């Protein structure tokens, strides 16, 4: 009789241990899932180290995505009775490559003039200004989205072209026949090189401005 009771007691203890282990395992799974969910829902405003290999072909691909957003938001004239053409009908691969070559050439000219490339601080400031002063936040959000909301890609494929184009006129007239011309020649050989960036950028928060909108602009 005592042996039977002891066996039953041991069986109950074993069942209790198994139940406890199962409960602990279930709690661990739930906790891990919740942590992963909360982590995935965390805002992406933190800094991102940009250790990315960016080739000329990569830049052309991102340029196409950017131009496609611009085209989709371009207002088609009412007086034009023809339907708005598709993006591929108005922008060729050659045109996309030229746009990339142009902003890389501008960047190289600025680097030659200053003795240093555009800095991460300058590109970050340009991104911040875009996000703060945009008149078309929905367009800027789409531009960020097609670049994967990746601060490095936004800085180098969106902010760099705008910033370099704006800065070039500040000295281009004085340098056009001299150093700038040389820079453009040198830059041509640099536009297809692979660029490995190790800067750190932060994804800015886009403002919700709704007034003062200028058609076909986002800044």
Image (spheres, rainbow, N blue to C red):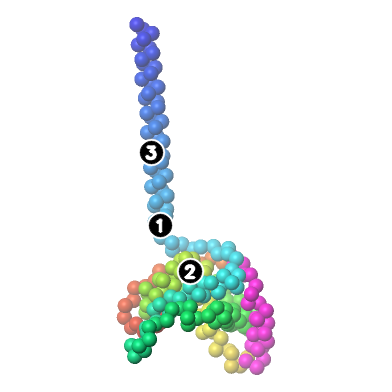
Task: For the N terminus, give its image quadrant.
Answer: top left
Residue neighbourhood size for the residue with mark 2, other residues' Cα within 10 Å, grouped as few (<14), some (14–19), many (≥20): many
The Cα–Cα distance between marks 1 and 2, rounded to whole angstroms, is 19 Å
| Residue 154 screen position, x and y as percent | 49, 71
Residue drawn where x is 36% and y is 20% of the image: 12
Going from N to C along the chain, the mark reached first, 3 or 1, is: 3
* Side of 15 where 121 appears, left or right: right
Residue holding disc 3: 27
Residue holding disc 2: 147
Identify which residue, 202 or 103, lies in the foreground: 103
Q: Is residue 15 above or below residue 66?
A: above
Q: Is residue 72 magenta?
A: no
Task: For the C terminus, give its image quadrant.
Answer: bottom left
Q: Secondary structure at mark 2?
A: loop
| Residue 45 screen position, x and y as percent | 43, 63
Q: Which mark is residue 42?
A: 1
Q: Nearer the viewer, mark 2 or mark 3?
A: 2
The image quadrant of residue 194 is: bottom right
* Side of 72 where 122 appears, left or right: right
Q: Is residue 197 magenta?
A: yes
Q: Are marks 2 and 3 in contact (CB under 8 Å)?
A: no
């Amino acid at each position: 009789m005592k042996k039977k009771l002891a066996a039953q007691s041991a069986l109950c203890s074993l069942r209790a241990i198994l139940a406890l282990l199962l409960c602990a395992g279930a709690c661990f799974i739930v906790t891990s899932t919740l942590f992963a969910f909360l982590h995935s829902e965390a805002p992406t405003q933190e800094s991102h180290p940009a250790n990315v290999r960016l080739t000329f072909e990569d830049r052309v691909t991102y340029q196409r995505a950017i131009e496609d957003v611009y085209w989709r938001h371009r207002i088609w004239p009412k007086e034009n009775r023809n339907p708005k053409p598709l993006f591929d009908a108005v922008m060729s691969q050659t045109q996309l490559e030229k746009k990339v070559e142009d902003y890389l050439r501008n960047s190289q000219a600025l680097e030659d003039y200053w003795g240093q490339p555009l800095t991460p601080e300058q590109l970050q400031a340009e991104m911040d200004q875009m996000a703060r002063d945009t008149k078309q936040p929905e367009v800027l959000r789409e531009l960020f989205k097609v670049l994967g909301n990746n601060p490095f890609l936004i800085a180098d494929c969106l902010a760099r072209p705008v910033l370099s184009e704006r800065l070039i006129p500040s000295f281009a007239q004085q340098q056009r026949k001299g150093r700038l011309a040389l820079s453009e020649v040198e830059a041509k050989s640099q536009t297809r090189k692979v660029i490995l960036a190790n800067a750190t950028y932060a994804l800015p928060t886009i403002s919700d401005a709704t007034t003062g909108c200028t058609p076909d602009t986002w800044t």
